[in-house]
Image (spheres, helix red, strand yellow):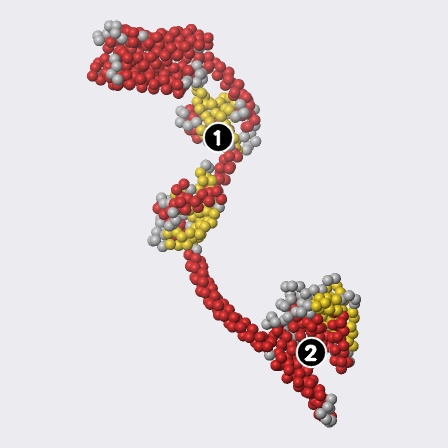
C-alpha cells in the first residue's frame, strides 16, 4: 500500500500533463483525431483518480472500481478511434461501442454475482488490452509513412496492451499493482510522445502539400478569390476568376484599396475586416464595384490566414445580384400581402393544417368573432364552430389535396351568437410548410332569407297540392258528366233523328202536292220547312257523331271495298247541291284502289270533306281524286274557294271552328273535327293545305287495312 498511492499519483501527474497538451492542441488545431485523443487522455486521468480513490477509500472500492473500469474502457476506445481518424480510416464506432458496453455489462454482472475482484476486473482489462493492441497494429501499418516515430508508437501500444492483459496473472503478486502503475505510466508517456511527434511530422508534410494545393485551387477556382491585408486594406493577391468578374487585370487588382471595390467607406471597411480577422463573423453582404462601373450584390466568406510573416484575410466572393433582386421582390410581395391581409375589411385567417390551429388573424376577423387578435392566434378552428374535430380534419384534407375549397358553415362568436358563413380556403406554401389561407364571408342575412323562401315554397307547394286535388276532383266530376252526356246523346240518337226525318218526309210530301194543290206562298214556306229540317238533321247527326266518338262507341266493321265505288256514290249524291251553287263537281279515279276498311265511315268522311268544299266555294269547281300510293289509298278534295290563312289552317280541325269570312255558309264547325277523328279510327289521317285566294286541299289518307290498335278507338 506504501508504494501504490505514490505510483498512482506519479501516473496521474504524467497523465494530466499529457491530457493538457492534447487538449490544447485539440483546441487550437480543431482536428478530429486530436479531439478524440484529448478526450481519451482526460478519461484516462479520471480513471487514475478513481483508482486513487479505490486505494484510499476501501469502503467505496466497489462503486469506484466499476467507474474506473468504465473510464478505462472508454479511454481505450477513444485512443483507438483517434488513431483511426488520424490514419484516415473510419472508426468502427458501433463495433467499439458494443464491445465496450458488453465488457462493462459483464463487469457489472460479475460484481453483482459477488465474484472475486480479479474476475470482476478481467473484462475491463481485457477490452483495454485488445483496444491498445489494435491501436498498436494500426500504427504499425502506418510505419512506412510515419517513419520511426510511428514504429515506436506501435511498439508502445502493443506493450501497453500486453501489460493490460497481464493483470489477472500479477493480481496476487505483492507490490505488483504499484509496479504496474509505474510501467503503465512509462508506456503511456512514451506512446503519447511518439503520437505527438508523428502528428507534427504529418502536419508538416500536409502543410507543404496544402500550400501547393492551395496555389492550384486558388488559381484555377471558378469562385472569385481575394487575399487582403487587413492592416492596409489592400488586395494582396487575386485569382483569374476575380480578373474576369471585376474586369481588372491581376496586376491592377493587386495593390488596390478595398474602397476602390467595396462601396462602403474606409471606416466601415475597417470595422468589417476587424470582425473577419477576429473571427467574429465570416459571412458578409456587400455591394462591389466593377471596372465597368456596374454595382453588383456579393456575398463574401472571409477569414484570417496566418503566414510566417503576417496575418492576411482570405475572401471568397459570390455574385448574388439575381438572388438579392429576387429576395427584395419577395420582401416587397410579403409586405404587400401583410398590408392587404391586415388592412382588409374581410375576416381572414391563416390556419395550420395539423390541429387546425389559427396562426394569424386580421383585425376584421377579430371584430367579426369578438376576440382580440392575440386571443385568436391561440385558438383552433374547432373553437369557432360546432363541428367535430374529425369533420374539420376532413375539410382541411380536402382543401390541401384539392388546392381550393368553398364551404358553408355556422360559426360561433365570442358572445355565443351563431352566424352563417361561407369560407373560401386555399393552401399556401411557405418554404417547406403548408398553411391554409381562409376568407370568411358573413351570409347570415342571405341564409335567413333563403330559409324564409324555403318556408314560403313549402307553403306554396302545399297550397298547389290542395288546389290540384280540388281540380282533379272537379275534373273527375266533369269527366263523369261528359261521359253521361255522351252516353245520353248516343242513346238518344234514334229519338232525335226519327221526329226530324218525319218532319222532313211530310214536308217533302206536302211540297209534291200529294195531299192537295198549294199556292206559291205555301210552296215557299214548305220548302223552307224542308230545308231547315234537313239542316237541323245535319247538325244533330254531327253532334251525335261527336258524342259517339268521344264515348268510344264507334264500331269499325271492315270489309273489302272498292274506294272508287264509294267516291262515285258521294259525287252522285251531291251533284244536285253542286248544280244549285252553279259549281262543277269532278271525280278523278285511278285503278286498283281496293282496301279493307269500313265503307260507311269512309263515306261519312268523304261526305263531310266534299260538303265542306261545296259550302265554302262560290265559283269554280270541287274535285275529288282517288289514287293508290303504295299501301295507302289517297282521297284528295280540292276546291277553288277563298282559301285559309296559316292561322286559320292551324285551327281548321278544332271543334266549332267557323271562320268569319264564311259565316254565311252556316254549320257547326264540327265537320272537319269529326272527319279527322273518324279517319284515326280507321288508322288514317287527314292533311290540309291552303292558299288565300287560290283554294284549299284536304287529303284523306287511308291504309290498305285498318290497324288492330286503331279499330274501334
Tally of marks: 2
The residue sitting at 69% across, 85% down in the picture is 505
Please name the residue that numbered disc 1 is placed on.
Answer: 299
Compared across the picture, whether 521 is left or right of 394 comes to right
Q: Residue 422: horizontal and vertical position, in percent?
A: 44, 52
Which of discs 1 and 2 lies nearer the camera? The answer is: 2
Closer to us: 323 or 256 = 323
Find residue 581 and report its image quarter.
Answer: bottom right
Find residue 569 and report its image quarter.
Answer: bottom right
The residue sitting at 62% across, 81% down in the picture is 496
Q: Is residue 234 above or below residue 366?
A: above
**Mark 1 or mark 2, earlier in chain:** 1
Q: Residue 367: horizontal and vertical position, in percent?
A: 38, 52
* Image quadrant where one finds the N terminus: top left
Compared across the picture, whether 376 is left or right of 488 comes to left
* Image quadrant where one finds the C terminus: bottom right
The answer to whether any part of residue 373 appears in the image is no
Closer to us: 7 or 644 = 644
Q: Residue 529: horizontal and vertical position, in percent?
A: 68, 87
Compared across the picture, whether 272 is left or right of 621 comes to left
Find residue 594 and report its image quarter.
Answer: bottom right
Dot 1: what SS? strand
Please name the residue that numbered disc 2 is placed on.
Answer: 662
Q: Residues within 10 Å of mark 1 (few under 14, many from 20)?
A: many
Q: Is residue 574 above or below residue 446?
A: below
Q: Residue 602: horizontal and vertical position, in percent?
A: 70, 71
Residues tagged 1 and 2 counted as in contact (Cβ below 8 A): no
Amino acid at each position: 500500500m506504501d508504494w501504490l498511492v505514490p505510483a498512482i499519483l506519479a501516473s496521474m501527474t504524467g497523465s494530466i500533463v499529457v491530457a493538457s497538451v492534447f487538449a490544447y492542441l485539440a483546441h487550437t488545431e480543431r482536428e478530429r483525431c486530436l479531439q478524440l485523443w484529448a478526450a481519451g487522455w482526460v478519461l484516462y486521468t479520471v480513471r487514475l483518480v478513481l483508482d486513487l480513490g479505490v486505494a484510499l477509500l476501501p469502503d467505496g472500492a466497489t462503486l469506484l472500481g466499476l467507474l474506473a473500469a468504465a473510464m478505462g474502457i472508454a479511454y481505450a476506445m477513444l485512443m483507438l478511434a483517434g488513431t483511426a481518424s488520424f490514419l484516415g480510416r473510419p472508426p468502427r464506432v458501433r463495433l467499439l461501442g458494443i464491445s465496450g458496453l458488453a465488457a462493462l455489462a459483464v463487469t457489472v454482472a460479475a460484481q453483482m454475482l459477488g465474484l472475486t475482484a480479479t474476475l470482476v476486473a478481467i473484462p475491463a482489462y481485457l477490452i483495454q488490452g485488445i483496444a491498445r493492441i489494435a491501436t498498436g497494429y494500426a500504427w504499425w501499418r502506418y510505419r512506412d509513412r510515419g517513419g520511426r516515430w510511428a514504429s515506436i508508437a506501435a511498439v508502445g501500444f502493443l506493450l501497453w496492451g500486453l501489460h493490460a492483459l497481464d493483470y489477472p496473472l500479477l493480481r496476487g503478486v505483492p507490490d505488483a499493482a504499484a509496479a504496474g502503475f509505474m510501467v503503465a505510466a512509462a508506456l503511456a508517456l512514451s506512446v503519447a510522445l511518439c503520437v505527438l511527434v508523428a502528428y507534427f511530422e504529418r502536419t508538416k508534410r500536409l502543410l507543404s502539400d496544402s500550400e501547393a494545393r492551395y496555389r492550384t485551387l486558388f488559381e484555377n477556382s471558378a469562385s472569385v478569390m481575394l487575399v487582403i491585408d487587413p492592416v492596409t486594406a489592400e488586395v494582396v493577391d487575386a485569382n483569374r476568376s476575380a480578373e474576369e468578374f471585376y474586369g481588372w487585370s491581376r496586376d491592377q487588382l493587386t495593390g488596390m484599396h478595398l474602397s476602390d471595390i467595396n462601396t462602403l467607406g474606409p471606416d466601415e471597411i475597417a470595422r468589417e475586416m476587424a470582425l473577419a480577422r477576429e473571427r467574429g463573423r465570416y459571412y458578409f453582404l456587400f455591394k462591389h464595384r466593377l471596372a465597368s462601373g456596374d454595382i453588383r450584390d456579393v456575398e463574401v466568406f472571409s477569414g484570417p490566414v496566418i503566414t510566417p510573416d503576417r496575418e492576411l484575410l482570405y475572401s471568397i466572393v459570390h455574385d448574388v445580384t439575381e438572388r438579392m433582386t429576387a429576395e427584395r421582390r419577395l420582401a416587397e410581395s410579403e409586405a404587400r400581402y401583410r398590408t392587404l391581409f391586415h388592412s382588409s375589411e374581410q375576416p381572414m385567417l391563416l390556419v395550420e393544417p395539423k390541429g387546425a390551429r389559427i396562426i394569424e388573424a386580421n383585425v376584421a376577423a377579430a371584430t367579426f368573432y369578438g376576440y382580440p387578435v392575440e386571443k385568436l392566434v391561440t385558438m383552433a378552428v374547432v373553437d369557432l364552430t360546432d363541428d367535430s374535430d374529425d369533420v374539420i380534419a376532413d375539410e382541411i384534407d380536402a382543401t390541401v389535396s384539392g388546392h381550393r375549397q368553398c364551404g358553408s358553415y355556422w360559426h360561433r362568436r365570442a358572445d355565443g351568437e351563431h352566424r352563417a358563413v361561407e369560407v373560401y380556403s386555399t393552401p399556401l406554401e411557405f418554404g417547406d410548410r403548408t398553411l391554409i389561407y381562409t376568407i370568411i364571408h358573413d351570409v347570415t342575412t342571405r341564409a335567413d332569407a333563403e330559409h324564409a323562401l324555403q318556408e314560403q315554397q313549402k307553403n306554396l307547394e302545399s297550397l298547389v297540392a290542395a288546389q290540384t286535388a280540388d281540380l282533379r276532383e272537379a275534373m273527375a266530376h266533369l269527366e263523369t258528366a261528359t261521359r253521361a252526356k255522351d252516353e245520353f246523346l248516343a242513346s238518344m240518337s234514334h229519338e232525335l233523328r226519327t221526329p226530324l226525318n218525319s218532319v222532313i218526309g211530310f214536308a217533302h210530301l206536302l211540297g209534291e202536292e200529294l195531299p192537295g194543290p198549294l199556292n206559291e206562298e205555301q210552296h215557299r214556306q214548305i220548302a223552307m220547312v224542308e230545308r231547315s229540317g234537313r239542316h237541323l238533321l245535319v247538325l244533330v247527326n254531327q253532334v251525335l257523331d261527336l258524342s259517339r266518338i268521344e264515348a268510344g262507341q264507334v264500331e269499325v266493321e271492315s270489309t273489302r271495298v272498292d274506294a272508287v265505288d264509294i267516291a262515285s256514290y258521294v259525287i252522285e249524291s251531291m251533284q244536285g247541291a253542286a248544280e244549285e251553287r252553279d259549281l262543277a263537281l269532278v271525280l278523278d279515279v285511278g285503278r286498283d284502289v281496293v282496301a279493307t276498311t269500313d265503307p260507311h265511315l269512309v263515306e261519312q268522311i268523304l261526305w263531310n270533306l266534299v260538303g265542306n268544299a261545296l259550302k265554302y266555294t262560290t265559283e269554280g269547281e270541287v274535285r275529288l281524286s282517288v289514287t293508290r300510293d303504295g299501301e295507302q289509298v289517297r282521297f284528295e278534295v280540292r276546291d277553288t274557294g277563298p282559301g285559309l290563312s296559316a292561322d286559320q289552317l292551324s285551327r281548321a280541325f278544332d271543334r266549332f271552328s267557323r271562320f268569319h269570312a264564311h259565316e254565311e255558309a252556316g254549320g257547326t264547325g264540327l265537320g272537319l273535327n269529326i272527319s279527322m277523328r273518324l279517319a284515326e279510327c280507321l288508322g288514317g289521317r287527314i292533311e290540309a293545305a291552303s292558299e288565300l285566294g287560290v283554294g284549299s286541299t284536304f287529303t284523306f289518307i287511308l291504309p290498305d287495312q285498318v290497324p288492330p290498335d286503331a279499330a274501334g278507338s
